[in-house]
Amino acid sequence: MKEGQDLVLKNVTVVPETGFIIVTEEMDKQDAGVMRADPDRNTSKTFKHVIYDTTSNVAMATCDSTVTGTYSQADNYAQVDSVTACFVGDFASHFSYTSSKSGAYGYLNVKYDGGSLSTFTYNIATNGLLSDK
């Protein structure tokens, strides 16, 4: 690992240049999918990211992100349709986000007071499983 590079463990991200630690967990069980007339199915999943200040060990905010997608095992196809987020906590008003998507990947760019804090990457598999990377 190079100095200044983000350290990412399974569910913990340390961002040394900003002094934040982010802990991620799955909020709810993933929807089983909604059957439509064609083989495409829709699914969604919510992830909880708790953002801590490394100097005071205070939870600054919780970011609940919801990822939705469409998949088809029959067509070997999957795409992320949307990524949305909501911040709660004492310092929630300092946080904002932008999101983007590209095929089977969705991205949540978290900002603190307008500056980039971290980017969460989500993926949907052709069996509908949504995960964070």
Image (cartoon, rainbow, N blue to C red):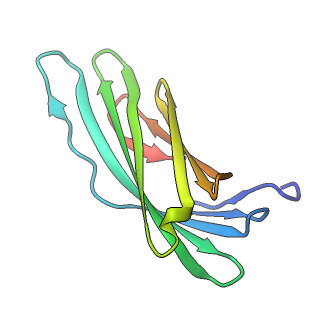
Instruction: Give how far across and how far down residue 94 sits, in percent.
Output: 56, 63
Residue 110 in the figure: left or right of residue 34 = right
Q: Looking at the image, is 116 positioned above or below residue 80? A: below
Residue 48 in the figure: left or right of residue 117 = left
State the residue at coordinates (27%, 55%): 29
State the residue at coordinates (37%, 28%): 126
Residue 43 in the figure: left or right of residue 34 = right
Q: Looking at the image, is 56 positioned above or below residue 91? A: below
State the residue at coordinates (13%, 23%): 36
Camera-side residue: 91 or 68?
Answer: 91
- Residue lying farthest left? 37
Q: Is residue 90 visible?
A: yes
- Residue lying farthest right? 3
Quarter of the image with the N terminus in it:
bottom right
Total marks drawn?
0
Instruction: Give how far across and how far down residue 48 sits, in percent.
Output: 42, 61
Q: Looking at the image, is 29 positioned above or below residue 33? A: below
Q: Is residue 107 visible?
A: no
Q: Quadrant of residue 32?
A: top left
Instruction: Give how far across and how far down residue 23 sits, in percent.
Output: 54, 67
